[in-house]
Structure formats: C-alpha cells, structure tokens
Amino acid sequence: MKRFSIFFLFIYISSCAIAHYIMPLREYRAVWLTTLNGLDWPRTKANSQNDIEKQKKELSDILDQLCAVGINTVMFQTRVRGTVVYPSEIEPWDGCLTGKPGKAPGYDPLAFAVEECHRRGMEIHAWVVAFPVCKVSAMKALGSSALPRRHPELCYRSDEQYIMDPGVPETGDYIAKICDEIAQNYNIDGIHLDYIRYPERGIRFSDQKTFQRYGNGQSLKQWRSENVNSVVRKIRATLRSRKPWLRLSCSPVGKYADLPRQSSRGWNARDAVNQDAIMWLNEGLMDVLFPMMYFDNEHFYPFLLDWKQSAHHGTIAPGLGIYLLHPQEKNWNLLQLQRQMNVLRQAGLGGYAFFRSKFLTDDVKGIYEWTKEFNKLPALTPAATSLDSIPPTRPNAKARIRNFQVHLSWTPSADDSNVDVSYNVYRIEGYRMLPIALKISETSYVYSPSLPAVLHKPFAITAIDAYGNESEPRVVCAEY
C-alpha cells in the first residue's frame, strides 16, 4: 500500500503544473458559510436598524469576495442547532443574529442571502443541521420554544447537549417539515444536510429504550442504518412533492468505509455512524455528496478514488479542510491543498467544497489568490438530468456595439417543466465557448472587454433551467 501511495502521489504531483488550466464547464465550487456562533457571519448583532444594515453589508462583502474567486455555491447555515436564521413557524431564532436566542433580528436573513447569492449568479443551498440540538444553556435561554421542551420525546440529553433520536419515527417527519418550510418559502437551489448520522463513539448516546420499542428483530447496526435511511427518504419525498428540482446533498464522514488495502481506522461513514451515503447517491435519494475529507496523503487519496469509483449516480464534490492551513490548526502548507485540488479535478470529481468561508476570505496561506487562479473561468454546477433532462427553448438574441461595450439582449425562453429559467453568456474563441456570465435572471447583459478587438468576436447565449439543463446556444456577432 505504501508503494502504491508513493506512486500515486508521484503521478499526480508531476502533473500539478497543468492541472489548474483544465477548466471544467461544470463543477461545484462551494463553501460552507457558518452562522453557528457567528463563526463566518455575522460579526455585528442586529439590535437596531443601523446594526441590520451593518450585518447585511458584512454578508454582501463576503459574497462579493466569494464571487470574485469563482465560487458558484454557498451552503448557508440555516438550521443551526434546533434554531434557525429565518422567521419560522416551527423553530425559534438562533442567537447568532442578535446575541439573544429566540430574538428576531428585524429582517429575514435567509431571504436576503438568497437574493444576494442569485444577484451574483451563485447557488444557495440551505444548510440544515439534522440531529444535534441546542445545549442545555441555550435551552434555558429559549424557554418553552426550545425543541427539547416542545418535543422531549424526540430528544436525548447527552451531557450538556441535546440530540434528536433518529430511531423515533417522528424525528424524520419533524426534520422533513423543517426542510419543507424552507423549500416552500424561499427560492433556494438546494437543501444540504449536516450531521445526518448517529453520534460517534466519543459522544454518550443511549438509545436502548428506542431500540426495544422499534427494533423489530433487527440488529442494532441494521436498525440504526435504516433509521437514518428513513429520515433521508422522508426529506427526499417531501422535496420532490414540493419542488422536485431542488438538489438534496449531505456532508458525510470523509471515508465511506474500509478499503481492501487501507483501513479507515474506525472512522468512516457507513460503519462507524450508520451513514450509507453511497447508497443514498446511487438510489437517487441524494443528488450530491460533499464528503468531509479533512486529511491528507494515504488518508485522502485512496478514499478519494473510492468515493469516485463507488458512485454510479449523482455527484461527488469532496469537502476540503482549508481551516487546516491556519497556524492554530494543523498549519498545513498551501501545497497540500493545491495538490488535493489538482488531483480531484484531474480525476474527474464533481468539484469541491471549502470548510469554511472565513479561512478563504482571510486568504490564509494564500488560498484565496490560489483559488482565483484555479477558477480562472466561471463554471456551472452539474445538472440533475436524472430528475429532468429536457432543456429550455433556445433564445433569440442580438448584439450591438456602443461606447466600446457589447450590449447583448435576448428573448425569454420557455421550459416544459414550468420552472425558472436563467441565461448564460459566452464568448466564442475558436472552437471553445468561454463563459462570461452565468445564471443571469435578466434578458440583457453589457460586456466590457479589456481589448477592443474582442468587440467583434462572436457571442453565444443559452437558457438554463432549474434542473441545470442548458439549451442550444444562439450565436450572434455584434454590430454598430
């Protein structure tokens, strides 16, 4: 195995110099934007109108930075710990917004985040923490609105933390109801599930009474796995009936299972925490997996290939631990992340996700500038063709040159599924269509080239639906 690892690394390191010039037309370039304790956002607490504007500007500035380096997907932490960052009829406000759990911030942060992401052509996936609930101190602060007090039958107290019990059938119904509320009220692009698994061995969790009641002759391992599967199925069914184009994703433990020649050392998704993520992907219960691959060398590369080889449906976009670059964490050098990013792109994975946003925008060890170069051209996210494969109609377009700018406009396109349609603008160079602007909601775009000669290049306009299906291009040449 050691010889294999050295050979594998040598092959890929030798090609790192050219890897970032291979620009996929579609891949996830995602970040987790954490609201828990305001880790990524917000810094300002919204207790006045002036505070609200500061809080909004903080988020806008972060999104500007993410957009500038080609990030196309934001996993926005929406359900935090049995608390939320939007006005909900089910759960109370999280304290990250105002400093006081249960207190409304005076505006709708999720609605604002959706609008701002879409204005920049980025997808926003509502990040829902599934089973962990608030700490005992937060429960006391929330009072009667806290989940352990409203539904004690769904919660288990583990020391100073409450955890929802996946073995209680109503747990899945409850989380599906949360996801449905978000999907119904917000124009999100997906739901992203976190901690959709049993607690690891180091966390005290006794579900013997639940097992005795619902086990029905199964082994504990089989029963626990099926409990998590059932929650995922309920969420999938709920979203399909509400908005079938929404992507459903999760962040499984970074190693799926032991490999024939490489042990996971007791920490993997399938066997350690009952998280059969590959089955979810291959059966269409999930559209995307963002496995949390926050390690390197023999703990990263063999398991990266295992995710790719095991997946026969959907998309694998590994989660990369850019926080490990920080001197107070593992103090990795930038080359370790560069190598991982180059390898996963060359290996044909479906993109990547960074944990977490602040380490990127702070440019720790130069990761921000490297990412800008790595993502030199924009990219669309992968299409969900298993849900719908019919593209919208091709738009009619025209282009005019005025004041050293190309003014492009086009007619609206129709889609057979009656879903939202947006538009992509490309510049044609030889046989390639180079993306200029993606997922524009308007039917016009003004392009300001850096060189006057580009004004006379052909341009292409396509329509793209909510499933990611793209129409045939309409090619136009600008005229005066």
Image (tube, helix red, strand yellow):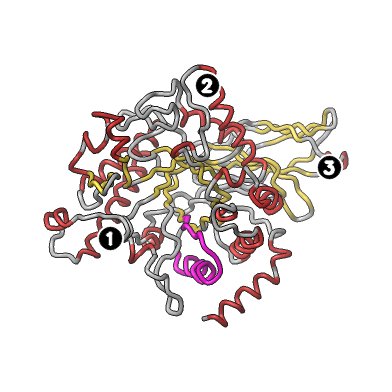
Query: Residue 467 placed where, x, y %?
Result: 49, 46
Residue 223: image quadrant is bottom left
The correct choice, above or below, for 433 with respect to 276 in the image is above
Which mark is nearer the camera, 2 or 1?
A: 2
Q: Residue shown at 54%/18% (left/top)?
A: 50
Left or right, 338 with reference to 205:
right
Which mark is nearer the camera, 1 or 3?
A: 1
The residue under label 1 is: 225
Magenta span of residues: 290-312
What number is the disc on residue 8? none
Left or right, 167 with reference to 200:
left
The residue under label 3 is: 454
Looking at marks 1 and 3 on the same chain, the residue that comes earlier in the sequence is marked by: 1
What number is the disc on residue 51? 2
Query: Residue 91 placed where, x, y %?
Result: 31, 32
How many marks do you count on the picture? 3
Left or right, 245 with reference to 8:
left
Q: Say which element carries label 1.
A: helix
Residue 293: within the magenta? Answer: yes
Residue 436: image quadrant is top right
> Hey, what amino acid is under mark 1?
Ser
